[in-house]
Every structure is written in structure tokens, then in C-alpha cells.
């Protein structure tokens, strides 16, 4: 007789759920690991983005996105980089269209309504001319953070964003206050994004220019470019005007010379006026009768320029000299007054070509 038949081994039913749990855990860990890597890639890209290195940041953002990371801030920054690198707004708008619903979903989560997400949404809706939505998110950010429980904890970047939001809802005084607070926080902490610090310095410098604080404006533009040389918010024309008004003539000539925009013709006049100013520097801030230039009414200023131009022309006609010669004393005296008065007019109006042509004094500037 044969012995007892060996029993065929069968998997224990109780082990199957455990095996499935283990497989699930492995898959979950792999997913978490992939997301962690994508998050690290996003952080690397954001660090470059905050330095204004958009060309270097873009492939990192694309890599994080291709890894499956669904993040509104990623898409917003990626869109901005695409415009900077590709040189056209279509790529930015395409990516921002993807970012908008993701940001809305993130903001709807408990604790998800960060200042940066609300700011990005307001900017996107502004770009899309959806004013009600823009206003909604801008107001939410202002109420929640600027008027929230701890505004003193806000960073320089935060105050810059709040300044932009006040600009979007047309609150110029509140915008200026936020921009200036941003500059103050950046100066105190000496950290944060170089690009945001550069942008807010340029914005405050422009505000100072409007307030006729020309020397201060020129310094602000200088610092903005030092931090981020590619900052296109520092327009060569306005920077040149601030330098001209601050009597920094050689630097004004350089900045006017870099102007390739629609103000290029005015900048050409600026180059020549700065050269003439440099020839007779230093210039005073008062006219020959002791009246401060900034206090002269517009019509009175034009009348004084006409008077100074006649005297300057007469002095040039009476004195014989060639380019490169030391200016005769009489010519230098009248050139000094002419340049000071016309420079004041230029800073106020940001345009002198039409005035010079109308008054027949363009040759006194351009030659």
C-alpha cells in the first residue's frame, strides 16, 4: 500500500490582504517619493526665479510639472518665465489659464488662502480683464493679511505684493505706503528675493521722481539695477531724467543713450543737454535772482528759458571758439543758466523736443 498522499500547499487566505497592503504601501511610498522630488525641483526653480534667472528656472519648473506635480504657484511662475524667455505673452497666458483653476482649488482648502496665491489669482484675472474676480481676490488678500492680526510679520515680498494689489484696485496712497514699507523691511532684514527687492526699489524711485526727489529717485534706480541688472521696470529714459535733475551728467548721458523705446528722441535731447550741463558743472538749484527752480510756475519757467536762450545765443555769437576749447566765461555763464532752467522743464514735463522746436532753440541743445 502506498503511503499517505502529500498535501498540496495552498496560500493562506489570511496572507493575501497583508500582501495587498504591502504592495499598496510600496506604491504609495513611491508616489510620495516622486512628489517629494518634484517639490525639491520646484524649490530649486523658485530660488532661481526669485533671483530673476528665468531661463534657468523654466526647465526646472517644466521638470516638476512633468513629474505630475499639480501646484498653482508652480504654474504661475512657469508662465511668467515663459514670457521672459520666449519674449511673447502667449505662453504666459496659456500657462496662467491652467494655473487659475488650480489656485482656486488650493485657496478653497482650509488654510490654503495664502497671500501669494491670492495675489497670483488677482494678477491673472487682471490680465484677463476680469475685474470683479480681480477685485475679489485683491480685497481678500488686503483684509486677511494687511489688516489681519499680525501685519508686522509680513516680509518684504509680502508688502510688495500688497502694494501691487492696491495698485490693481486703484488705491495709490495705500499702494505707496505698502511699497515703502516693503523697502523698509528689505533694508532691515537684508534677505528675501533679489528680484522683488529690485522691483520695489524701482517702484519707490518712480514715486520719488513724481515728488521731485530727483537725487533720491536716481539712487533708488541705481540700487534696483545693481541688484537685478535686467530689471525692465527701470526705464533708461526716466532713470536718465532723474540723473540729469540730480546733476549726475555723465551717468545721465549713459542712461539716455541706452533708451531704445518710444522716448528715444527725447533721450537724444537728454544726452546733449547732459553733455552741456557737464561742461559747466556744478549747476545750482536757484535762478540768477535767487528763486528756487522748483518753485517757478510753469509759464514763468518757460519765459525764463526764452530769456536764457536769447542770452546764451548772443554769447555764442559774440565769442569765437571751437569744439573742445575751454568755453569762454560769458558763454559758460549763460549756458549754465540755460541748462539749469531747461533741465527743470524737462524733469517736469518729460518732453522738450516739441518745446525746443516751437521756440526755435533746438540748435542750442543739439549742437
Image (spheres, rainbow, N blue to C red):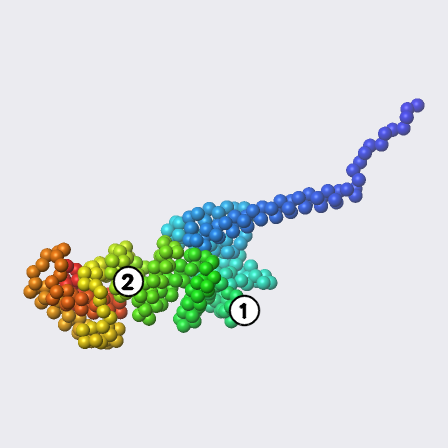
Which numbered disc covers residue 280?
Answer: none
Query: For the point 52% across and 59% down, which residue is it?
Result: 103
Q: Is residue 258 left or right of residue 52?
A: left
Residue 192: image x %, image y %? 47, 58
Frontmost residue, 5 versus 284: 284
Quadrant of image for the C terminus: bottom left
Residue 323: image x %, image y %? 13, 56
Q: Quadrant of residue 335?
A: bottom left
Location of mark 2 (residue): 243
Q: Is residue 140 visible?
A: no
Q: Is residue 195 visible?
A: yes
Query: For the point 12% across and 57% down, which residue is it?
Result: 325
Front: mark 1 or 2: 2
Q: Is residue 8 left or right of residue 138?
A: right
Picture layout, residue 14 above or below residue 250:
above
Outermost residue on the right side: it is 1
- Mark 1 is surrounded, within 10 Å at the Cα level, by few (under 14), some (14 to 19) or many (20 or more) other residues, namely few
Query: For the point 80% across and 36% down, which residue is it?
Result: 10
Q: Is residue 198 left or right of residue 104?
A: left
Frontmost residue, 33 versus 121: 33
Frontmost residue, 96 versus 254: 254
Query: Does dot 2 land on a helix, a strand or a loop?
Result: helix
Label 1 vs 2, first from the N-terminus? 1
Location of mark 1 (residue): 150
Query: How many numbered callouts?
Result: 2
Query: Does dot 1 land on a helix, a strand or a loop?
Result: loop
Residue 126: image x %, image y %? 43, 63
Query: For the point 30% across and 58% down, which residue is it?
Result: 236
Alpha-carbon distance for marks 1 and 2? 39 Å
Outermost residue on the top side: it is 1
- Mark 2 is surrounded, within 10 Å at the Cα level, by few (under 14), some (14 to 19) or many (20 or more) other residues, namely many
Picture layout, residue 191 above or below residue 343:
above
Amino acid at each position: 500500500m502506498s503511503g499517505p498522499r502529500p498535501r498540496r500547499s495552498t496560500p493562506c487566505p489570511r496572507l493575501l490582504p497583508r500582501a495587498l497592503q504591502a504592495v499598496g504601501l510600496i506604491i504609495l511610498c513611491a508616489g510620495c517619493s516622486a512628489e517629494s522630488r518634484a517639490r525639491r525641483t520646484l524649490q530649486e526653480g523658485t530660488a532661481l526665479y526669485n533671483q530673476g534667472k528665468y531661463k534657468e528656472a523654466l526647465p526646472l519648473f517644466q521638470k516638476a510639472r512633468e513629474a505630475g506635480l499639480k501646484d498653482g504657484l508652480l504654474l504661475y511662475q512657469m508662465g511668467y518665465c515663459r514670457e521672459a524667455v520666449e519674449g511673447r505673452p502667449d505662453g504666459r497666458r496659456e500657462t496662467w489659464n491652467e494655473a487659475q483653476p488650480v489656485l482656486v482649488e488650493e485657496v478653497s482648502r482650509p488654510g490654503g488662502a495664502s497671500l501669494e496665491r491670492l495675489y497670483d489669482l488677482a494678477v491673472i484675472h487682471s490680465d484677463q480683464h476680469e475685474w470683479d474676480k480681480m477685485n475679489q481676490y485683491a480685497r481678500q488678500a488686503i483684509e486677511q493679511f494687511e489688516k489681519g492680526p499680525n501685519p508686522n510679520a509680513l516680509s518684504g515680498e509680502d508688502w510688495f505684493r500688497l502694494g501691487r494689489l492696491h495698485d490693481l484696485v486703484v488705491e495709490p496712497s495705500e499702494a505707496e505706503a505698502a511699497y515703502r514699507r516693503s523697502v523698509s523691511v528689505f533694508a532691515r532684514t537684508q534677505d528675501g528675493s533679489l528680484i522683488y527687492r529690485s522691483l520695489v526699489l524701482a517702484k519707490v524711485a518712480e514715486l520719488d521722481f513724481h515728488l521731485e526727489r530727483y537725487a533720491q529717485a536716481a539712487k533708488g534706480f541705481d540700487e534696483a539695477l545693481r541688484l537685478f541688472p535686467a530689471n525692465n521696470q527701470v526705464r533708461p529714459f526716466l532713470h536718465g531724467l532723474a540723473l540729469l535733475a540730480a546733476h549726475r551728467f555723465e551717468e545721465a548721458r549713459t542712461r539716455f543713450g541706452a533708451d531704445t523705446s518710444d522716448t528715444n528722441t527725447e533721450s537724444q535731447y537728454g544726452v546733449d543737454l547732459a553733455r552741456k550741463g557737464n561742461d559747466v558743472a556744478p549747476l545750482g538749484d536757484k535762478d540768477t535772482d535767487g528763486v528756487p527752480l522748483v518753485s517757478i510756475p510753469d509759464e514763468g519757467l518757460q519765459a525764463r528759458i526764452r530769456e536764457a536762450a536769447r542770452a546764451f545765443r548772443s554769447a555764442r555769437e559774440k565769442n569765437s571758439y571751437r569744439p573742445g576749447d575751454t568755453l569762454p566765461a560769458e558763454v559758460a555763464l549763460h549756458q549754465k543758466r540755460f541748462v539749469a532752467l531747461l533741465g527743470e522743464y524737462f524733469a517736469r514735463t518729460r518732453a522738450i523736443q516739441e518745446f525746443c522746436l516751437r521756440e526755435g532753440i533746438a540748435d542750442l541743445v543739439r549742437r
